Image (spheres, rainbow, N blue to C red):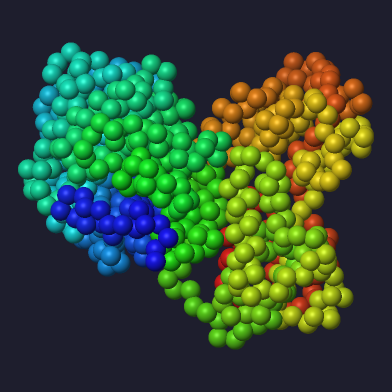
Amino acid sequence: MVKFQHLFSPIKIGSLVLRNRIMSAPTSMADLMPPEGYPTRENVAYYKMRAQGGAAVVTLGDVIVQGSTGKSHPTQILMDDPHLLPYIVKLADAIKQHGAVASIELDHGGRECRRPYISGYPLGPVAEANYFGREIKEISVEQIESIAEAFGTSAATAKLAGFDMCTVHAGHGWLLSQFLSPTSNKRTDKFGGSAENRARFPLMCIESIRRHCGRDFPIEVRISGSEFMEGGYGIEEGIKIAKAFDGKVDLIHVSCGTTESLIGVVRVQPSMFLEHGCNVFLAAEIKKHVKTPVATVGGISDPGFMEEILASGKADIVALARALIADPYLPQKAKTGREEDIRPCLRCNVCEGGVIVKHVLRCSVNPVSGREYEHEFARPPTVPKKVMIAGGGPAGMQAAITAAERGHKVTLYEKTNSLGGALKFAEFVSFKEDLHKFRQYLERQVRKAGVEVVLNTAVTPELVSNAAPDVLIAAIGAESVIPPIPGINGVNVIFAADIHNPGIKIGKTVVIIGGGLVGCETGLHLAQIGKDVTIIEMLPELAVDANMLHRMALLEELKKYTKNITGTKCIGITLEGATGVGPDGKEQLFATDTVVIAVGLKPLSDTVEKLRNTVSEFMSLGDCVKPQKVGEAVRAGYYAAIDI
């Protein structure tokens, strides 16, 4: 019997019957496309794996209906490209061959477009200079009609390619959302003013799709239930917008936010500082006022929570994006009662932040994400080996799991009394609950894979000699950098890596020396548990080593909780506090009870070198090579094991 009855019951959307209530939400491509904007084999494999994992609908995201006016990013699929069809045929085929419904999200960037990507100036509801200072031209009625027609012809092309349905993107601050919003739509003609008028253009796009594709091609519309922006609309207006689409589409997908608002952007992909499913209430309110099925999205990853959402009538479908990047097989695992095997999403936004900056998707917990195509060619080893792993942090645990799953005999040694390494602190930090779950996940998988675990044992050359492994993987971590600051050894000084150690006492007031990601997150945690925290950073800005989306969210939280001093170097520590020199060259004493040093880590290189020549096949990875973030360590562990 299926545990989650509501989650795995079918639902009819238009002419389609979905096999369950889990939708793979629209996401950008996992790999950089060529300048022409054609999906690569890597992109096809990315979407294919979501279908293999059991999602009912897999949605190709970020597709532009009119390239000359609507392209908002350097490489996007342009539906009016006459050479595109065979590429998206392959993509639709890959999704459908595993039983999922293939959907495609149709969009237009509007005033978010940039001149290098389009012909002429970006188009918006009215002429203006946008918040980046770019000149925006008012879209004419003729252009509105042309773009509405482009939605219809794009949907027809998608249907011809084998897609089963489409999503009209009318949220998040793109063109149709710009018309729906009273903040950006100041028109005085029939496309502006009342909620009915502001919905006219999006409805024209939907009518065009119906005209070109018929009733057997379901339409989903994605809206922002609230803009979460000063001066923007809230849920009351979101309800009016949803009612305008009620009965005219087959599914109303309720997201939130707008590209114009920092708070809105942070909520579109809810950060770790927000509660899980923080946007569900928007869908729940809208569902009370419409007859059309409603989908909810945003920071949802636990099957039990999904079941509660559906059982309580807050939504009819849950849409997952990052949760399926972390584990594409989440639906399949939940259906077969293997929830504890689901790899938890950290909501760290390494995935989306990386796509924006590097145009390549990576995931902190899933080493295969963004590399699905090459994963298809991984083969088990022909000769099982005896593998010794030194270090039970994320790199060592992932290496142990992968090596054991590939048939090797693996023994994992950890010098402390528990596994986890640099992840152990997460147990004590409220906004790191998902990271703590990931540590627990890794520990479970280590034991399920049949890895022998030896605790309270450091790996030495003598131990290696006695054990005689074929392969030794050193993942022994790093130690805190001790900067040459007078007073650094004072009794009021501790290191960020040690704040949760037994016996460590932290005073009421705290000065953090170092405003990188670790220092900022440490400061935020201490402030949230009641400490008076000041963060001092030498550089002009805080957390420059964080991915852009996480940094945006983190800086917003720091504004609420901590005093933040940049451009200031600590030159001395006494029992009274820390002395810093600011940009003006003047010294200032920051009085405090406790000074926390968070200026980085250095690899345990000497220990690594002692182990290097003890076996013929040796690898070192993780922090003992170079201090790394979780995702880098996990990927290093995975690929080290693949290479054995």
- Quadrant in which the C terminus is drawn: bottom right
Please tell me which residue is depicted at 56% across the width and 36% down the height of the picture: 273
Q: Is residue 486 above or below residue 602?
A: above
Left or right, 499 with respect to 575, comes to: left
Residue 439 or residue 622, whichever sits in front: 439
Q: Which of 571 and 459 is in front in this view?
A: 459
Side of 33 relative to 444 (left or right): left
The N terminus, quarter of image: bottom left
- The residue depicted at 67 percent of the width and 30 percent of the height is 528
The residue drawn where x is 31% and y is 23% is 236
> How many numbered marks does the figure carry?
0
Residue 560 shows up from this direction: yes
Locate residue 480, reporting x and y percent.
80, 46
Between 642 and 342, the residue placed more toward the observer is 342
Rendering coords of residue 544 (x, y %): 61, 35
**Where residue 97 sits: x, y (%)?**
27, 67
Q: Can residue 536 be seen in this view?
A: no
In front of the other: 462 or 142: 462
Answer above or below: position of 373 versus 241.
below
Q: Please tell me which residue is depicted at 17% across the width and 46% down the height of the picture.
A: 154
The image shows residue 463 at horizontal and vertical percentages of: 84, 75
